[in-house]
Image: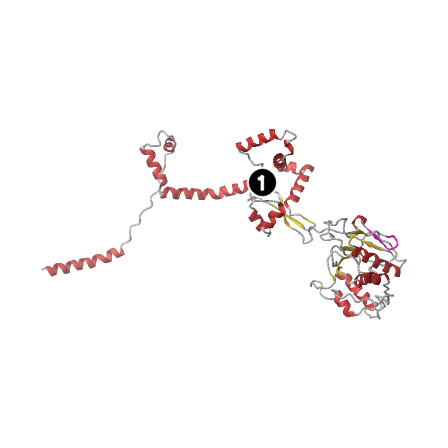
């Protein structure tokens, strides 16, 4: 009897199990957040009713996960709209004067009263106060002007055109004499600004006297790059004075250089002019200014070892300024004679010259009897223009009306031309033979004659 009951129980259990397995589990419906009565919210905001039962239950409901989820959803919906508005506001933040707190206003008023006194006005504190006041005034005026010019009708006025042009120029990085500047954003950190312009933070601080400040002033320019020649000056410079029958300098006040440079130019030009006394004389560009230093628009020409040397041109017309030359208008023979005189000093570091003018000079050297292996060592041509070569005469764009020469000084204090180099220049005589049209590549015997021993070759 007992066994029969057990069997029936097992049968019932086996029949019930599949039904349970196939049955779908009941899904709990997500409780919807209860609707909150606005009147109740207003009532519970009052301190008198906040401890009532209804208000306590309301606060508990608001802290529940369901309420938090709803808040997040609502925040997500408004995030995009708020983001657009924030971007619009941030765009104009730099143009608005910074709002001052009550404490700052009180401090400014006290300083204003204190700095009225003439004696105290000379203190560092008052000087800083005046500078800050001017900056605040400028920011306010700029914001006012920008708002005025935002109107399409006003934007066409001469006043707004001038203002907008100045704003555009201010927003760009400026490069003068190899110096470059960056514009700081509002509340930008020093570290992020340095990273943006790829300059070491310590270097940035020292160049701009930033000190230990963590942030930069928005809209202000900061130095982010210096030329390797920055800070170079001219010690012991002498003035190269122009002579009507040999050469003339475009800007005489920019004719200062080291004694080596001045003597090399004067003697080489005299030697060339003696061969063709009736031909037009040479026009010289800039050397350096008195005392050296930055000489706009040049990035070099700072230490008295650089010079812009004009090119001899065909024809009898005397030019007053540096003129662009072509292979047809260049007097290649006289220009080569001048360049060969510079090379004979063994102090010429390089001469930058347009690639198109190197071939006629190369051929003039062949006609004068210069060994071709020397010319190949000196000239970049006929190597490809796009390849940089460690030759003395190199291509540089913008040098078709002059050649930029740089000489080497063994000592900055006593940079003079050696006596043997002076003698070679004084007695130099290079005869030009043949013509470009008929014998462009015919080598001739070297005729570099001198009363002193033979001219040594100025190899690189």
Tell me what residue is drawn at x 80 percent, y 70 percent: 371
Q: Does residue 419 show up magenta in the picture?
A: no
Q: Residue furthest front?
A: 414
247 or 51, which is in the foreground? 247
Please state, as top left, top right, bottom left or bottom right, where the N terminus lies in the image.
bottom left
User: Which range is magenta?
Assistant: 243-249
Q: Residues within 10 Å of mark 1 (few under 14, many from 20)?
A: some
Residue 389 at x, y percent in the picture: 70, 64
Q: Residue furthest right?
A: 278
Relative to 293, say whether 371 is above or below: below
Examine the image and state in which quarter residue 184 appears. top right
Secondary structure found at label 1: helix
Q: Is residue 383 left or right of residue 202?
A: right
Q: Can the viewer see residue 92? A: no
Tell me what residue is drawn at x 10 percent, y 59 percent: 2
Residue 372 at x, y percent in the picture: 78, 70
Mark 1 highlights which residue? 94
Q: Does residue 244 show up magenta in the picture?
A: yes
Examine the image and state in which quarter residue 338 appears. bottom right
Residue 409 at x, y percent in the picture: 75, 58
Residue 398 at x, y percent in the picture: 74, 56
Q: Is residue 64 left or right of residue 109?
A: left
How was the colour assigned to the protein in this rendering? secondary structure
Q: Residue furthest left?
A: 1
Q: Can the viewer see residue 115? A: yes
Q: Is residue 82 left or right of residue 301?
A: left
Examine the image and state in which quarter residue 69 appears. top left
Q: How many numbered discs sit on the rendered protein? A: 1
Please state, as top left, top right, bottom left or bottom right, where the C terminus lies in the image.
bottom right
Relative to 74, say whether 258 is above or below: below
């Amino acid at each position: 009897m007992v066994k029969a009951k057990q069997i029936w129980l097992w049968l019932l259990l086996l029949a019930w199990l599949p039904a349970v397995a196939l049955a779908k589990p009941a899904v709990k419906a997500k409780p919807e957040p209860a609707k909150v009565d606005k009147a109740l919210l207003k009532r519970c905001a009052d301190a008198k009713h906040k401890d009532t039962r209804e208000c306590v239950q309301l606060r508990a409901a608001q802290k529940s996960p369901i309420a938090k989820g709803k808040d997040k959803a609502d925040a997500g919906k408004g995030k995009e709209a708020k983001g657009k508005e924030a971007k619009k506001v941030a765009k104009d933040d730099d143009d608005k004067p910074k709002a001052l707190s009550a404490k700052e206003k009180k401090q400014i008023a006290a300083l204003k009263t204190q700095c009225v006194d003439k004696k105290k006005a000379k203190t560092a504190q008052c000087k800083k106060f005046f500078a800050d006041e001017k900056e605040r005034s400028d920011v306010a005026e700029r914001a006012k002007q920008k708002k005025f010019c935002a109107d399409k009708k006003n934007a066409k006025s001469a006043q707004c055109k001038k203002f907008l042009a100045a704003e555009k120029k201010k927003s760009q990085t400026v490069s003068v004499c190899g110096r470059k500047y960056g514009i700081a954003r509002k509340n930008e950190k020093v570290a992020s600004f340095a990273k943006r312009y790829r300059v070491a933070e310590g270097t940035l601080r020292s160049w701009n006297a930033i000190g230990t400040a963590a942030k930069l002033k928005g809209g202000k320019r900061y130095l982010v790059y210096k030329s390797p020649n920055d800070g170079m000056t001219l010690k012991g410079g002498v003035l190269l004075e122009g002579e009507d029958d040999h050469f003339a300098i475009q800007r005489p006040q920019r004719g200062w250089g080291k004694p080596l440079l001045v003597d090399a130019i004067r003697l080489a030009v005299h030697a060339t002019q003696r061969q063709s006394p009736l031909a037009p004389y040479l026009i010289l560009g800039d050397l350096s200014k008195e005392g050296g230093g930055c000489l706009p628009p040049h990035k070099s020409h700072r230490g008295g070892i650089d010079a812009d040397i004009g090119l001899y041109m065909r024809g009898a017309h005397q030019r007053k300024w540096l003129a662009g030359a072509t292979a047809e208008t260049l007097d290649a023979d006289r220009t080569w004679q001048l360049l060969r005189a510079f090379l004979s000093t063994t102090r010429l570091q390089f001469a930058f010259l347009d690639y198109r003018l190197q071939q006629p000079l190369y051929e003039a050297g062949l006609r004068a009897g210069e060994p071709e292996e020397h010319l190949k060592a000196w000239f970049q041509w006929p190597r490809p223009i796009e390849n940089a070569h460690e030759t003395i005469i190199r291509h540089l764009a913008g040098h078709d009306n002059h050649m930029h020469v740089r000489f080497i000084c063994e000592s900055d204090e006593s940079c003079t031309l050696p006596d043997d180099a002076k003698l070679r220049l004084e007695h130099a005589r290079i005869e030009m033979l043949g013509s470009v049209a008929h014998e462009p590549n015919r080598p001739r015997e070297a005729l570099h004659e001198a009363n002193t021993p033979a001219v040594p070759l100025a190899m690189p």
